[in-house]
């Protein structure tokens, strides 16, 4: 076969191009849907099951409708119209997607299907439209016979889906923001419409130009750099999550997956903005000798509030941080004034991997890698807690920042984690940060010490010891051991974290913020400051963070 014939054999016809691009766009939008939906509804198995189900249903209905019309209406021009309508809808997603997400989050649905209206409204119509392409292309195919034409169309559409999956996952998401990725698929749809309908008449050229203008305008409007949370300083898609840095007044906040993770006071960078981070200092009261806490490991970095404060406050402490997301590390260094030194060492590794491979032992391990709807189960299990125990010194302490409710149905994850830690450590202490049955940060402290400290003993130690922060109010949140007979011990072979988190969906997540200065360590001064500066309570839907 000559080179010319080989080239002709590889050249795709217009219907074949349409099928291939529809596969790229449908799979790319499906992966993008996960990133758009996660900030409002989480990224649990239920969310992803809903996304996959809606896309399959929309494509199936599009195949059905397109197949019924293909014999009489299939033309390259009609396929071009499908791509233009898809691009126009994508422009709408960029413009009002966030508004629609917030609007649909209020529907009174069970947590497991809470994302269904949003996914259907945002991604059902464009996926349905793309479903028309395959039956139209099969009708227009130059292949002989229905079986050969159908098989060829399925093959091209599947190859396109593979390309869309890999390109979106490995290239677009790590490199671009959500709006820019949507722009890519919108522009691809417009380009395909032009390519398969040449020559273009004046009317279609006008429509195409209008859709292109709408798409560009939607991105320009969405990139204005301000949200309801404040001014967007930086935003990117990492391999693990959406990352956003937002300034509001003097407070800079790191959002991961749409959820507030860390905050920094721009005028006082080492201050604890979120109240729960003050609890990180409680191990200095739980330890028999706080001076022996000289090597600390944080699993999870975020904005590095705890690591920065420990290095600033305790001159004898060396802090290691294991953070799995390299973009989080880079963002912390550029926007949250994090500097590595001989006393602050940052490791781009997952927490469990780091503990397996390190040759260090620690006096304190702070587990700060949980989010309210995305919990790495491998950091919750009995086997992980045993590994952490092996890496602790004889008097070592584990501190876990758990997001859950203190009681009620939404407390299942907290109570399961408490039970799991109790299987490894003789004593586990619990400190809910907001009180009541709301979803909140609950701090768990596990020790190797058989004797248990009372609230009164901790208050007395708070009066005697200078740990840099007055912890009187935090100690008074001391809680009795919760009921655990109805929750499982989490194990590597069975850790139903998604099921345990499910009751939290739709409930309010309360984060307390402190306006008090904490630059001094004297307890009496701390009490005076706290009386003078009331605590601000921020609450948000568990879906929105």
Image: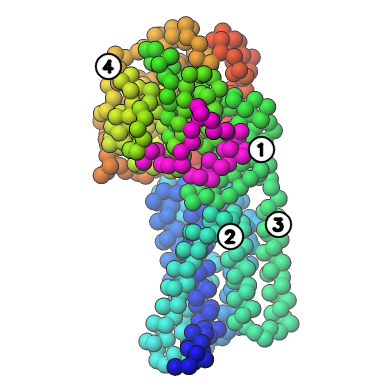
At 39% across and 9% down in the image, what residue appears? 457
At 68% across and 45% down in the image, what residue appears? 226
Sequence-wise, which precedes: disc 4 or disc 3?
3
Sequence-wise, which precedes: disc 3 or disc 1?
3
Q: CA distance from mark 4 to mark 2?
A: 54 Å
* Highlighted magenta segment, given as a residue range: 325-354
Residue under circle 1?
Answer: 247
Report crowding for label 3: few under 14, some 14 to 19, many 20 or more residues within 10 A (C-alpha): some
Q: Quadrant of residue 250?
A: top right
Report crowding for label 1: few under 14, some 14 to 19, many 20 or more residues within 10 A (C-alpha): many
**In the image, is residue 128 above or below residue 135?**
above
Q: Position of residue 6 (x, y in %)?
A: 48, 88
Residue 352 in view, yes or no: no
Q: Position of residue 47 (x, y in %)?
A: 43, 52
Q: CA distance from mark 2 to mark 1?
A: 24 Å
Residue under circle 2?
Answer: 181
**Circles 4 and 2: CB distance less than 8 Å?**
no
Sequence-wise, which precedes: disc 4 or disc 1?
1
In this rendered view, identify the residue nearer to me: 114 or 293.
293
Q: Secondary structure at mark 3?
A: helix
Q: Quadrant of residue 539?
A: top right
Q: CA distance from mark 3 to mark 1?
A: 20 Å
Residue under circle 3?
Answer: 220
Q: Secondary structure at mark 2?
A: helix
């Amino acid at each position: 076969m000559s080179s010319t014939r080989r080239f002709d054999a590889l050249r795709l016809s217009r219907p074949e191009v349409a099928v291939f691009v529809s596969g790229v766009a449908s799979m790319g939008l499906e992966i993008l849907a996960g990133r758009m939906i996660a900030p409002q509804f989480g990224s649990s198995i239920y969310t992803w099951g809903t996304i996959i189900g809606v896309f399959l249903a929309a494509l199936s209905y599009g195949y059905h409708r397109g197949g019924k019309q293909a014999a009489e209406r299939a033309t390259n021009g009609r396929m071009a119209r499908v791509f233009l309508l898809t691009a126009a809808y994508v422009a709408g997603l960029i413009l009002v997607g966030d508004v629609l997400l917030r609007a649909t989050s209020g529907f009174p649905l069970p947590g497991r299907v809470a994302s269904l209206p949003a996914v259907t409204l945002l991604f059902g119509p464009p996926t349905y439209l793309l479903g028309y392409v395959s039956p139209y292309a099969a009708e227009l195919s130059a292949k002989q016979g229905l079986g050969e034409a159908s098989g060829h169309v399925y093959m091209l559409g599947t190859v396109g889906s593979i390309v869309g999956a890999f390109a979106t996952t490995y290239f677009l998401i790590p490199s671009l923001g959500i709006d820019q990725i949507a722009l890519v698929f919108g522009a691809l749809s417009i380009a395909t419409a032009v390519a398969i309908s040449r020559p273009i008449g004046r009317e279609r050229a006008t429509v195409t130009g209008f859709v292109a203008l709408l798409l560009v305008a939607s991105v320009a409007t969405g990139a204005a750099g301000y949200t309801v949370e404040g001014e967007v300083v930086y935003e990117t898609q990492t391999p693990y999550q959406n990352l956003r840095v937002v300034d509001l007044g003097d407070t800079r906040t790191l959002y991961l997956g749409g959820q507030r993770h860390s905050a920094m006071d721009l005028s006082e960078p080492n201050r604890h903005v979120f109240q729960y981070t003050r609890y990180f200092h409680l191990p200095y009261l739980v330890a028999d000798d706080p001076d022996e806490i000289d090597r600390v490991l944080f699993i999870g970095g975020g904005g590095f509030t705890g690591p920065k404060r420990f290095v600033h406050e305790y001159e004898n402490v060396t802090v290691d941080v294991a953070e799995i997301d390299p973009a989080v590390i880079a963002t912390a260094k550029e926007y949250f004034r994090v500097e590595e030194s001989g006393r602050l060492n940052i490791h781009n590794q997952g927490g469990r991997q780091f503990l397996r491979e390190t040759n260090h032992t620690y006096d304190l391990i702070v587990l700060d890698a949980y989010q309210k709807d995305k919990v790495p189960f491998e950091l919750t299990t009995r086997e992980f807690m045993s590994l952490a125990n092996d890496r602790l010194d004889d008097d070592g302490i584990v501190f876990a920042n758990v997001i859950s409710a203190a009681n009620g149905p939404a407390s299942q994850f907290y109570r399961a984690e408490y039970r799991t830690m109790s299987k490894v450590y003789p004593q586990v202490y619990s400190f809910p940060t907001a009180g009541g049955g709301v979803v909140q940060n609950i701090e768990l402290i596990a020790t190797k010490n058989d004797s248990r400290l009372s609230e009164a003993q901790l208050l007395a130690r708070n009066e005697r010891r200078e740990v840099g922060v007055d912890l009187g109010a935090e100690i008074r949140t001391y809680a009795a051991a919760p009921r655990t007979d109805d929750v499982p011990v989490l194990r590597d072979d069975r850790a139903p974290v998604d099921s345990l988190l499910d009751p939290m969906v739709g409930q309010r997540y309360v984060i307390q913020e402190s306006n008090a200065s904490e630059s001094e360590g004297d307890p009496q001064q701390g009490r005076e400051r706290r009386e003078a500066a009331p605590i601000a309570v921020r609450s948000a839907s568990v879906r929105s963070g």
